[in-house]
Image (cartoon, rainbow, N blue to C red):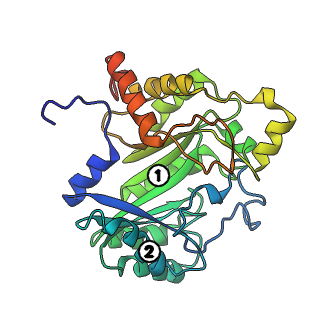
Amino acid sequence: MGNERFYYNEFGTYLRQQFGGKVQKITIDAGFTCPNRDGKVGRGGCTFCNNQTFNPAYCHRNRSVAEQMKEGISFFAHKYPEMKYLAYFQAYTNTYGSLDVLKLRYNEALSVDGCVGLVIGTRPDCMPDELLDYLADLGKKTFVLVEYGIESTNDVTLKRINRGHDYACAVDAVVRTAARGIPVGAHIILGLPGEGREELMQQAAKLSELPLTTLKLHQLQLIHGTRMAEEYALAPEEFSLFSVEDYIETVVDYVERLRPNMVLERFASQSPKELLIAPDWGLKNYELVEKIKRRMLERDTWQGKKYRG
């Protein structure tokens, strides 16, 4: 690392180590739904969820996977001609379908020139062993990262946000995935109703016990069109939305307690302004990252400083 100060394990560095150059994720909507919407697990989905907040303009389910990949690549290619690309299956639950259909979608993405692997976003209750076996074989030929929406390690919270699975389910999925040699990520929301600072610090320690390769954090955001937005309108006192200063302190405290070799992909979500109710910090993600690093420097701290493995 030379003279560069270590703050935390950055996802960009991890990808450069994997591929030897710059890599960009291209977000794909492969047309899947979610068992928490179609009635298999529940209806209405998670209370915080509006999938419109995830997808860039080129990502639209009325286009094929290959078309979305090519359009996404063209967006970056003129500026970074040497760039490599990962197909990021993000919208809804991207392992929720027959194995034949899933194979078709994944292979369609991999067939696009410049695509060097897959990142598959899904729920921990939607990962059968048959699919894991297939992904393990695929991972011998190309890069595959499975990313689970865990959101919280607290079962009371998971029930409140209508998640449709408990934390034990998430642990099981992560362990089964990692056991096959597949890199595995988790997504967590900081600031869900009922979760205070001490609980979040315990959460960091709890997640560090799992065989996770990567971790994504972001602040709770209230989004138009979600059930949580309706709950907030009725009982705003039940929500403690972060100020940017409080969030930075919480993230730094959290990162101090994480396993030192976990790769941290992001710290915030930036939803479209027309969909966002609160909090609106007026910051780009990279600006928040710089503020977090500056605060870590001021506190002379780093990822894992308070980790107790």
- Label 1 amino acid? Val
Question: Is the C-beta separation of discs 2 and 1 under 8 Å?
Answer: no
Q: Farthest top residue?
A: 299
Q: Position of residue 154 (x, y in %)?
A: 63, 36
Say if 129 sits above or below 11 in the image: below
Location of the C terminus (image quadrant) = top left
Q: Looking at the picture, tell me which residue is in the foreground, 108 or 209.
A: 108
Q: Position of residue 119 (x, y in %)?
A: 42, 62
* Left or right: 18, with 150 as reference point: left
| Disc marking residue 254 | none
Report if residue 225 is visible in the image: yes
* Left or right: 95, with 306 as reference point: right
Q: Farthest left residue?
A: 2
Of callouts 2 and 1, the N-terminal one = 2
Q: Position of residue 172 (x, y in %)?
A: 51, 51
Image point (32%, 25%), residue name: 302
The residue identified by callout 2 is 71
The residue identified by callout 1 is 174
Q: CA distance from mark 2 to mark 1?
A: 32 Å
Location of the N terminus (image quadrant) = top left
- Label 2 amino acid? Glu
Image point (55%, 66%), residue name: 57
Q: Residues within 10 Å of mark 2 (few under 14, many from 20)?
A: some
Q: Farthest right residue?
A: 234
Q: Secondary structure at mark 1?
A: helix
